[in-house]
Amino acid sequence: MAQTVVATSETDPVVPHTPQPLQTNTGVSNNKLAIWLFISSESLFFGAFIATYFLYRGRDAQFLKGPTPSSTLNIPFTSVTSFVLLMSSLTMVLALAAIRRGDHRRFRIWILATAIFGMTFISGQVYEFTEFYREGVHLGTNLFGTTFFVLTGLHGAHVTIGIVWLLTLYGRSMQGKLGTDKSEAVEIAGLYWHFVDVVWIFIFTAVYLIPQH
Amino acid sequence: MSDQVTEIETSGEGPGTAVAVADDPGALVASAGHVAVPDEHGNHPTPRQYVLIAVVLVVITSVEIATSYLNTGHTNLVIVALFLMAAIKFFLVAAWYMHMKTDQPFFRRIFVTGLIGAGIVYGIVMFVFSSTVLKS
């Protein structure tokens, strides 16, 4: 019978790890089931705000005072931050691959890179929000301001939570508490991170790329 | 079958780090100087494949941005093209990075159920609101 032996550090004993069907009611990992259910519910959550953005998009044009979306949105700048977030998905999946093969040094590099990419994205968003505020677009300025800040702000909050999660995993790895046998914890964080990325794919298209009125 | 255990990799973590697989050398996937150990869910993509997906994502995003600057007068066509490219990017990330291609179908069903639910619910909401409350 095939047997996999995994050891993660010199403090970890070499423990035989033979893949077995999970002893749960569903036959699948409860933790993964939970994150997939959460992601599924998040689809409905973000769907509400994206739908609202489209419902109100351009409907208050006659009430716009001051800057319009087309004059406010900085597509080149947001394109760069979108590239950064997209690349963070690559580093996240490379971190998972690294911990699965027991390469903890590379895991730490990739997970830290992912967190740094996430922080870069959030920094860009903070800069963008600040610029909007200076140009007179606030949460209550008009329907564009309301829907824009709520949609992108909630996404930014999710990214921020993801960054804290990634840094926690990095810290646990540095303490030697994240062995290869706990790679599922990284996989779950990765699923959350990738979901946040795919949500941004649609927000970027809906808010920035579609021609404005 | 024998119970032979072979040490495969010891780099990066000093002595004591070992990832070894016995009796199933065919299941090993070599990548970037390392040897991947397949988990209970089957073979995952290699790092090289992950990088290739990233390159494709970057190319599509570049085309998206270029498309948004097109001034063809066919706004609806541009919108459809942009959402089509977003959908392709979504599929690539979900299938490859979220491992929906290789993971258990049960998880895929949960995710797709949420997506379809969101599509139906907000499709109805947008139709009703745009044809009644916000009609002007």
Image (cartoon, rainbow, N blue to C red):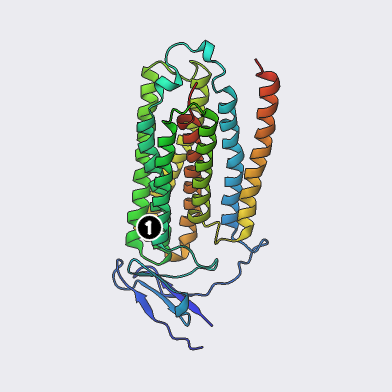
Please tell me how crowded label 1 is: few (under 14), some (14-19), or many (20+) other residues with Cα within 10 Å.
some
Left or right: where does residue B5 sit relative to residue B116? left
Residue shown at the point (64%, 51%) measured from the top left = B110
Q: Quadrant of residue B8?
A: bottom left
Locate the C terminus of chain B and report the quarter of the image it occupies: top right
Tag 1 subunit: A
Residue shown at the point (60%, 57%) measured from the top left = A30
Q: Above or below — where is B23 with respect to B16? A: below
Q: Where is residue A172 in the image (x, y as percent from the top left)?
A: 39, 55
Q: Can residue A32 be seen in this view?
A: yes
Say which of B65 and A46 sits in front: B65
Q: Above or below — where is A210 with respect to A72? A: below
Say which of A79 and A49 sits in front: A79
Callout 1: SS: helix
Residue shown at the point (48%, 24%) measured from the top left = A212
Q: Quadrant of residue A131?
A: top left
Q: Position of residue A80 (x, y in %)?
A: 35, 37
Q: Position of residue A134 (x, y in %)?
A: 36, 18
Q: Name the residue under label 1.
A: A173
Q: Position of residue A20 (x, y in %)?
A: 58, 72
Left or right: where does residue A52 sit relative to residue B8? right
